[in-house]
Image (cartoon, helix red, strand yellow):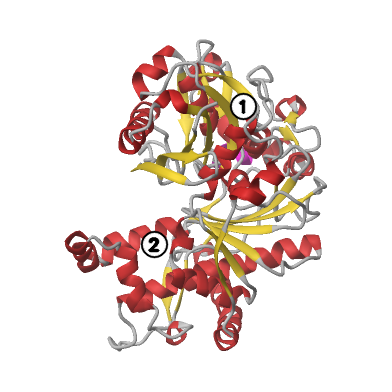
Amino acid sequence: MGKYLMALDAGTGSVRAVLFDLDGNQLGVSQQEWEHKEDPRFPGSMDFDWVHNWDLASGCIRDVIKETGIDPAEIAAISTTCMREGILLYDKDYNEIWACANVDARSDDEVVELIKKSPDLEKEIYKVSGQTYALGALPRILWVKNKMPEVYEKAAYVGMFNDWLILKLTGVMSIDPSNGSTTGIFDLATRNWDKSIMEKCGLRTDIFPKVYESGTVVADVSEKAAAITGLAAGTPVVAGGGDAQLGCIGVGLTAPGQGAVFGGSFWQFEYNTSVPKTDDKCRVRVNCHALPDLWQYEALAFYPGLIMRWYRDSFCQLEKQLSKETGRDTYDLMNEKAEKIPAGCYGMFCAFSDVMNYISWKHAAPTFTNFALDPEKFNRYTFYRAIMENSAMVTKGNIELVASVTGEYPKEIIFASGASKSPLWCQIVSDVLNIPVHVPKVKEATALGAAILAGKGVGIYSDITETVKKVVKIEKTYYPNAENAKVYDGLYDTWRKVYAAQLALAGQNLTKKRWSAPRV
């Protein structure tokens, strides 16, 4: 048995290879930021460059092996995870022929076409799949059929990005239910493809790869992939899953009634359920968990991590320079100043992402509002903190939304991924939600979840629930400050009203929507 487990994580903003020991300790990580650019011919598109991005991913694997100095033959197994919704089409020889990243929104015409075909079809599909047209694969595949018929004719398989990584490593095509269910072509109850959904949309029903439940071996690393990555040929590669589902495993959410928030490029609120029941109003997403008898309600906040990166790169040049000189993280330097700003930022707030409404989802133009021309109070640290507070308020709205379906508001949550590295952000989340927030020791929970599945696939771990009890460690718990919670409670109500007004402005085309689902 090998000594190590490896996770490959293809996120919205970066790709990384993470190495763990068998006790769940992170030994090394190599990460590369990547971008998904718009094709100028197709407004709203978000292309995925599979050639360049495989170079980045394979480079991360080589780098983490080199940096940790391990013998790659001692890696017991590998698993993969990724942003959901991004899809790839392949020809019969497994060559990539088309791909888009997760919030690609080029298919407005196709959504209109589907609605004209059947006004109630989206709701019918949601009841079975837990998905709408907003992020699902159906309008995008129809777009390929309409706009690139030569690609559509060649298509032999459809897959997700974590399965793409497995294909690059092994040469075997596969898909898992946790990520596959986000296509909108899965039956939640059976955890398998539902070809009738494609038939109703006038699409092909012969492009579905074999489904492997998360935590089962798909194949071994090929000689070709070994030469490119530095891995040992023959290393088992295990079916992984979507980033949020694997993140839940990585923080110990393996039972019904547990909730977590993952603060990455997107912020995801996940709530476990033992019954694949959808929302009568189609507002909340429902996915398969990466564990066979669980499903999840999910509500998303758009782009908090990417917004913070934009703010860092646009306005924090001084801190970036100090970071180079001192070796301290740019965000840590900003946090030191921002924590001195009082809760509520003197009444100023911002708007970037709305509370989820899956069937009719749109976001107003980004804005900061209600600030004065007072540099002592309203400086770049105030605006920085406002972004943190706004992310937490959107999350509060999403938790309340899920609670309206389940009848249960969580008494506590786990907070993980990149944003949880900031003590200030953790405290703000606790204050805004007014509940305890537990932060796990391993911040890259998604990668840890993938590593646990890798170990399960090769028999190192026999029971995932028992494994996470041993492996997942809570580093710190943040408790709400009653005074701050009161401030945020008042600010939240105001923010909801102001955001509604911002949406109205965008609806009048006076401002440009930050993002909207196709046809919304």
**Label 2 vs 1, first from the N-terminus:** 2
Q: Amino acid at mark 2?
A: Met
Looking at the image, can residue 4 be seen?
yes
List the single residue furthest toward the top.
93
Check disc 1: other Cα within 10 Å, few if <14, some if 14-19, many if 20+: some
Q: Residue at x 47, y 69 (%)?
A: 425
Q: Nearer the viewer, residue 20 or 51?
A: 20
Count of marks overlaid on the render: 2
> Looking at the picture, how far across and down is residue 334, in whole percent?
32, 71
Residue 460 position by quadrant = top right
Name which residue lies at 47% across and 56% down: 303
Quadrant position of the N terminus in the picture? top right
**Main SS, magenta residues:** helix
On the picture, is 67 further left or further right than 356?
Answer: left
The residue that label 2 is drawn on is 308
Magenta part of the protein: which range?
A: 108-112
Tag 1 secondary structure: loop
Given the image, on which type of amino acid does mark 1 rest?
Val
Q: Is residue 500 left or right of residue 120?
A: left
Q: CA distance from mark 2 to mark 1?
A: 39 Å
Dot in front, 2 or 1: 1
Q: Position of residue 487 (x, y in %)?
A: 55, 86
User: Which of the pair 174/42 is nearer the observer?
Assistant: 174
Q: Position of residue 397 (x, y in %)?
A: 63, 68
Residue at x 47% of width, y 30% of height? 99
Taking the magenta stretch, the answer to whether it contains residue 57 is no
Q: Is residue 18 above or below residue 202?
A: below
Q: Which residue is mark 1?
A: 458
Is 212 rendered above or below residue 315?
above
